[in-house]
Amino acid sequence: MDEFASRQYPVKEHMRFQRRMWVVERIGWSVLAAIALLGLTGLFGNGWLSRGNAAGNGLSVEYERFERATRLSGFAFHFPPGGAERTLHLNRAFQRNYEISRIQPEPTRNQAEPDGLSLTFALPPEGGTVMLWAHARGYGIQHIIARSDNEPPLSFSILVYP
């Protein structure tokens, strides 16, 4: 007797339909496994796939490409060697879309301007790192532009999930 032949007794079966359903079921399992693997690698935040680094003519930033709107995000701005006082300027999009929770080290001066936010830090002459922690206020793609003193701007994008 053929196992894959349709039967009428003891239960009415339609094996061609059953085989199609097995294929759909296996595709569903594969999609669920792919989502789990992508989540483990950081596509939905906090993993190696999510870690981003942007560098310009001196200033560089480490950030997460994928964030959650409810989660605290960290930005590490690395300044090159230079003067004792360095200014970090963040564009209006950062000012509008993020709520800053903490900055380390504390800025000596901060100023809200029409085109963004300027933070001035007392850093050692050999350069230094400024850590900025912030919550996203909304979700979607955020285009951030940062610059240090009079250097060319550094731009990067972040996808914030709800």
Image (tube, rainbow, N blue to C red):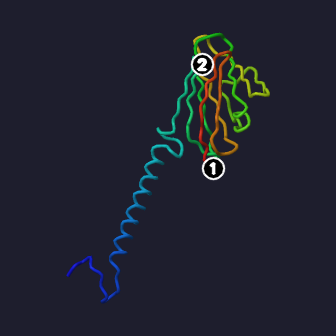
Residue identified by numbered label 1: 162
Instruction: Pinpoint residue 7: horizontal percent, then vertical percent.
Output: 30, 85
Give neighbour class at mark 1: few <14, some 14-19, many 20+ (Cα, 10 Å).
few
Q: Residue furthest bottom?
A: 9
**Element type at mark 2:** strand
Question: In the rendered structure, which disc, 1 or 2, sits on the residue that comes first in sequence?
Answer: 2
Label 1 and label 2: CA atoms lie apart by: 32 Å
Residue identified by numbered label 2: 79
Amino acid type at image mark 1: Pro
Give neighbour class at mark 2: few <14, some 14-19, many 20+ (Cα, 10 Å).
many
| Nearer to us: label 1 or label 2 | 1
Q: Residue furthest front?
A: 16
**Element type at mark 1:** loop
Q: Nearer the viewer, residue 113 or 73?
A: 113
Vertical comparison of 63 with 126: above or below? below
User: Where's the N terminus, which quadrant?
Assistant: bottom left
Amino acid type at image mark 2: Phe
* Residue drawn at the location 59% of the way across and 20% of the way down: 59
* Residue drawn at the location 65% of the way across and 45% of the way down: 139
Q: Nearer the viewer, residue 159 or 39?
A: 159
Instruction: Pinpoint residue 91: horizontal percent, then vertical percent.
Output: 70, 29
Tags 1 and 2 touching, CB below 8 Å: no
Viewed as shown, does residue 118 lie left or right of 80?
A: right
Instruction: Pinpoint residue 111: horizontal percent, then vertical percent.
Output: 78, 24
* Residue drawn at the location 69% of the way across and 37% of the way down: 98
Instruction: Pinpoint residue 50: horizontal percent, then vertical percent.
Output: 51, 39
Which quarter of the picture shows residue 85? Answer: top right
Viewed as shown, does residue 127 lie left or right of 91?
A: left
User: Which disc is residue 26 wearing?
Assistant: none
